[in-house]
């Protein structure tokens, strides 16, 4: 796609709310997927053949490249957090690692100094500049590795020249399942790059749900490596609402379904006694008018912006509950994060969220405002319990070890 066309596409402000006909698309697709040949808890044969890494690798001579010049900490989502956790453990388990980041991002990670290879992308201020920079890099491949085994943490960042041995992580198929939740250019980029990438790389994903969707749309197998809760430090001193609040740690992306909560608080006066706290670290997006209407109805809403890990711990620990009414998730790390902080997490019964928590977890709820309202109100008088028992016991060391198994298998293929 020419640079001029990419720039034109990025100038289109395209962030529509999700129309009703798309909200049920996953239910329809799930019925279609019953026609597929499934296996309970399936993993690819690649993972089944691989050995375990429980300690630093004895054969650490082969080079592991991590290519993520499109990673920007200021706009990090779950995929970025996953990359950070995995890299920290890769460096302990497999010392021969190079990390390819843009020059701005490299300054955020002094602990990786000596392992980082800076890629000159220029200042990527705004979507158009970033699109042009990534297109130039993809075409030229300038500064990117041409030896070793390469991990691409974000499915669309594959240089056009790449014919080496690689593993790509694809956490979700949001652009296929809910296309109107994905900005126009990103949707087009995924449609162009992901099929090409899957021809050249082995695939890792985070849930059986995503594994099935990748198989359904692209006809390839992927290895499921479940993610671990991200540990939270001791809470920091910060200003939080005086009353127990309902906390939603998410960006203002349409599939995160903030409108569901705002509608609940507008329509039921009982909820207005409970403050509603959003992070919205990437900005208000299209939620500004809905938030203003809620405040006009007397709803107490706080917008924190991006929080540090210690501030996040405080908001979880002082909350009545956290919520994740998402229409779509590739995994759902924030639910595990909440449970690890001993905060009950109310999650929707959609997609991979039913895998994120144990099968008998009591707060997986249908997306019905009445059910969510009554559950939140009931929590105000419910006895205290230990929600940490519902948190996953998977560790990032285990997840990184499984990634290294796949990478090592690809190296030897």
Image (cartoon, rainbow, N blue to C red):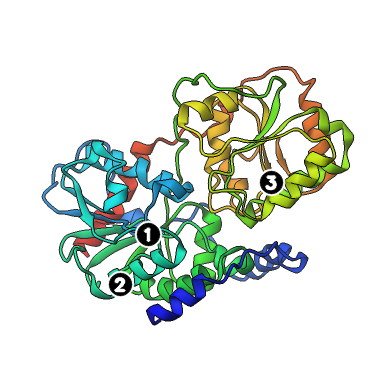
Q: Classify 10 Å Cα crowding around label 1: few (below 14), some (14-19), many (20 and above).
A: some
Q: Is residue 12 above or below residue 115?
A: below
Residue at 33% in and 37% down: 397
Report the front residue among 129 and 193.
129
Q: CA distance from mark 2 to mark 1?
A: 12 Å
Q: Are marks 2 and 3 in contact (CB under 8 Å)?
A: no
Q: How many marks?
A: 3
176 lies left or right of 16: left
Q: Classify 10 Å Cα crowding around label 3: few (below 14), some (14-19), many (20 and above).
A: many
Residue that badge 3 annotates: 325
Q: Helix, strand or loop at disc 2?
A: helix
**Residue 325, position in %: x, y?**
69, 46
Residue that badge 2 annotates: 136
Residue at 28% in and 75% down: 139
Q: CA distance from mark 2 to mark 3?
A: 38 Å
3 or 1: tag closer to the N-terminus: 1
Q: Would you say residue 34 is visible in this rendering?
A: no
Q: Is residue 231 above or below residue 168?
A: above
Q: Are marks 2 and 1 in contact (CB under 8 Å)?
A: no
Q: Is residue 273 above or below residue 160?
A: above
Q: Would you say residue 338 is visible in this rendering?
A: yes
Q: Helix, strand or loop at disc 1?
A: loop
Q: Helix, strand or loop at disc 3?
A: loop
Report the front residue among 299 and 341.
299
**Residue 406, position in %: x, y?**
30, 55
Residue at 50% in and 21% down: 235
Q: Are marks 3 and 1 in contact (CB under 8 Å)?
A: no
2 or 3: tag closer to the N-terminus: 2
Residue that badge 1 annotates: 124
**Residue 1, position in %: x, y?**
40, 81
Which label is found at residue 164?
none
Q: Quadrant of residue 81?
A: top left
């Amino acid at each position: 796609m020419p640079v001029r066309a990419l720039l034109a596409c990025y100038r289109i402000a395209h962030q529509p709310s999700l129309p009703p006909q798309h909200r049920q698309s996953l239910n329809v697709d799930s019925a279609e997927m019953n026609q597929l040949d499934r296996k309970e808890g399936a993993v690819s044969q690649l993972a089944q053949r691989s050995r375990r890494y429980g300690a630093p690798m004895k054969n650490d001579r082969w080079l592991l490249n991590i290519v993520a010049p499109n990673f920007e900490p200021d706009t990090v989502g779950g995929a970025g957090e996953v990359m950070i956790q995995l890299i920290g453990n890769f460096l302990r388990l497999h010392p021969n690692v190079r990390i390819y980041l843009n020059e701005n991002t490299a300054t955020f990670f002094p602990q990786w100094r000596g392992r980082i290879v800076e890629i000159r992308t220029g200042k990527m201020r705004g979507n158009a500049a970033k699109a042009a920079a990534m297109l130039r890099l993809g075409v030229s491949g300038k500064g990117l590795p041409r030896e070793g085994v390469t991990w691409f943490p974000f499915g669309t960042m594959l240089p056009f020249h790449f014919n080496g041995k690689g593993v790509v992580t694809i956490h979700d198929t949001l652009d296929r399942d809910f296309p109107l939740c994905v900005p126009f250019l990103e949707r087009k980029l995924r449609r162009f790059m992901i099929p090409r990438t899957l021809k050249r790389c082995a695939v890792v994903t985070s849930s059986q749900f995503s594994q099935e969707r990748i198989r359904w749309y692209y006809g390839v197998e992927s290895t499921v490596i479940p993610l671990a809760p991200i540990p939270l430090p001791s809470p920091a001193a910060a200003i939080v609402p005086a009353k127990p609040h309902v906390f939603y740690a998410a960006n203002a992306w349409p599939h995160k379904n903030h409108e569901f909560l705002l509608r609940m608080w507008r329509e039921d006066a009982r909820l207005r006694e409970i403050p509603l706290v959003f992070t919205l670290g990437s900005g208000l997006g299209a939620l500004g008018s809905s938030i203003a209407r809620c405040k006009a109805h007397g709803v107490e809403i706080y917008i924190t912006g991006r929080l540090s890990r210690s501030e996040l711990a405080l908001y979880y620990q002082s909350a009545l509950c956290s919520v994740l009414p998402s229409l779509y998730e590739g995994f759902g790390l924030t639910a595990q994060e909440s449970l690890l902080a001993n905060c009950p997490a109310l999650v929707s019964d959609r997609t991979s969220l039913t895998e994120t928590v144990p099968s008998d977890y009591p707060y997986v709820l249908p997306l019905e405002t009445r059910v969510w309202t009554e559950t939140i109100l009931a929590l105000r008088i419910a006895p205290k319990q230990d929600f940490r028992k519902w948190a996953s016991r998977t560790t990032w060391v285990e997840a990184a070890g499984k990634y290294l198994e796949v990478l090592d298998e690809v190296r030897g293929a």
